[in-house]
Amino acid sequence: MLREKMRAIRPGKPVPFKPAAAVTAALFCGGGALGTLAKWLDTLALNSDVWWHRPIEKLALGQFFSDMAVWLLAALLIAVFSRSAGRAALNVFGFFAGMCLAYHACTLWLAGFDPGSYMLIWYSVTAVSPLLAVGCWYARGDGPVAVTLCVLIMAGFTLACFAVGWLYVEYRGILYVLAFAGAAGALYKSPLRLLTVPAGVALAVLVSPLLPFAL
């Protein structure tokens, strides 16, 4: 009965094992590449006299790739465009595992220290990422459950992409706005579904005083 209800929200599509495994492996490698990029940006000594350093400095790419917003967007895109909820769980887990392992290894190699407590946060996110990926996958389905999931996801992206407090939402940068817009676009199914965006923002403002820290 539960399976039928879930299929009514969004039915999955079967994928042969070999292509599915290849996709997950590619996402693991992609996560590793982005984790390496994030650590490189984090350790890069910026010099305004070097032309290609200027856009990195202006956009604060090092900070952006150290924040949650870009990784949440990547996970959301991977999840919603997977062929099934199970594939979404495995694909997102593979991506985060690759990213965390690469970032941790590069920190040990490039910076010469072990960021144990910091990485514990990311490993915890990786551990719960399959469950969150399933929720994201169903959010692109139909019915009230999907709409509720969309509102919750947009609330999470509001907290990740903006400085949010009681009755205010402040701008953090163009990349964060693009990440927020990317999330809204990934969940879009109809003009009516766009109402989940202001609903998510309102929910984020309401719960912000209860949160001990921003995403």
Image: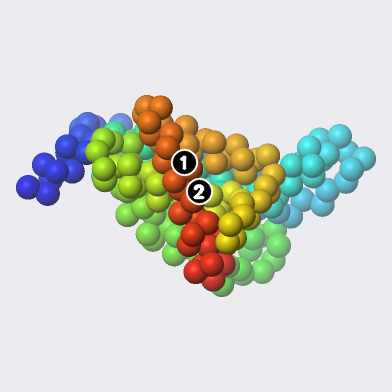
Q: Residue at x 40, y 46 (%)?
A: 151
Dot 2: what SS? Answer: helix
* Rendered view: 144 above or below 66: above
In the foreground, 119 or 10:
10
Please tell me the numbered disc located at residue 71.
Answer: none
Left or right: residue 9 compared with residue 135? left
Q: Residue at x 69, y 66 (%)?
A: 112
Q: Is residue 156 visible?
A: no
* Rendered view: 18 above or below 63: above
User: Residue 22 location, x and y as percent?
Assistant: 36, 36
Quadrant for the C terminus, please: bottom right
Q: Is residue 182 visible?
A: yes
Residue farthest front in this picture: 167
Dot 1: what SS? Answer: helix
User: Residue 132 location, x and y as percent?
Assistant: 36, 52
* Rendered view: 166 above or below 31: below
The residue that disc 2 covers is 201
Left or right: residue 173 compared with residue 157? right
The residue that disc 1 covers is 197
Q: Are marks 2 and 1 in contact (CB under 8 Å)?
A: yes
User: Residue 142 location, x and y as percent?
Assistant: 26, 35
